[in-house]
Amino acid sequence: FFFGPPAMLRLLVMAALTVGALGHGAIVSPRSRNSIDYLVGVNVPEHWLGDRDCTNITGGPCNNGQAAFWYSQGCFIGCPLCDHLSGRRQVDLCGLGANATLDPRLRTVNLDAPAGSELDIYRHNPWRAPGTAPVADACGLAGGTPWPQEVAEAGVYTTTKFAHHGMRGTALPPMDTGVRWRVGGEAEVTWQVENNHGGGYSYRLCPAAEPLTEACFQRHPLDFVRDRQGIVFRNGTVLPVKGVFVTAGTHPKGSAWARIPIPPDALGPRCIPGPDDTAATPHGCQPWERGLVDGPCAPCPGTPGSDCSRCGNTWKPSVPAFEPPCPGCQGSTHSHAIRDFVRIPADLPPGKYVLGWRWDCEASAQVWTNCADVELVP
């Protein structure tokens, strides 16, 4: 089911011109390798309008490079590989019949649909079985595709002397962050969701001397300090919030994941029903003024780039999927970041490690990953 660009590019070019990558997020602290372009003053791909600043715990200026543009897409639960194209295909792409393992009460979008039904259109996407969807690279793929062409859902990446579109995050050089965490102690991590498509996330460690693979990170999942999650505001103040965490149905078995605390909303207009749903002529989208209103939900078409449908109670900002932790803390925002504390296992030997952050989306078949250098000390 892996498609290279020549086979699909002809069919997807029109969708590519109008549809960008869905979710965007990145570690803010510790500074990730993925943020390397901050060294040359680049903090957003050139095709994006305006700057993409970030929020950190200092309350000061924040340039996180293009860290929010390292991800994998076309990544479905139970499938061995990502196809790099199908960010919006709501199907069991590889046909292996993998089922969701997440407690349906922890869904973040389309909560009105009965779990597992045909109307539960996001049931094949990464958050529905946390950690089981493949990734293209454990530290992300610049722009979300390995090809320089802009195809459906590609984030497009501005080339610098450090990185380029299609580069693997594991090829980025180490970055001396100066961050030292005590073995057996608690450590602070901050990340920011910029385009919110729900789901949840986890933190992992891999010894810096080992190959940075998913297998390595999965050997060292980190638990959360459950009562220390918070929302960081632009001025650096932190609002403590009650986090929602899950260990059942996750991979590796028993690993700790957190539901994204900021609910998504206004995910987009719904598709116009019609008989001709092909890659070349996908369903069109209703105008925004009609797409964000109440109405019946229908399964989404299975064509890359054609999923304009946004079911359940997530269309309108007035009806978020779950209770926001604070006023304005919903949807896509650059004004808030998410702060977590994680527990550093007491049995890990001191030394240099790489922190892996993985965000499994629910409203898209996408996984965001960043990697940051830290040192564990006795």
Image (cartoon, grey):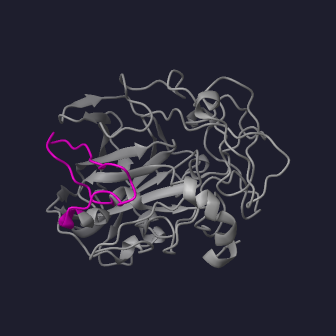
Inspect the magenta stretch and tell me whether residue 77 lies in it.
no
What are the residue bounds of the magenta stretch?
A: 38-66
Q: Looking at the image, which is closer to me, 182 or 83?
A: 83
Name the quadrant containing residue 167.
Answer: bottom left
For the point 25% across and 61% down, the residue is 42
Give me the residue at 22% from left, 36% from top.
234
Please, is residue 226 above or below residue 317 in the view? Answer: below
Where is residue 126? Give x, y as percent.
58, 53
Q: Quadrant of the N terminus?
A: bottom right
Percent x, y of residue 293:
63, 24
Q: From the top left corner, tell me how far across and down residue 294 is, in percent.
A: 66, 23
Quick check: can you spot residue 311? yes
User: Is 157 or 54 nearer to us in this picture?
Assistant: 157
Residue 249 spot, x, y in % from top left: 59, 48
**Occupied quadrant, residue 353:** bottom left
Q: Is residue 86 visible?
A: no
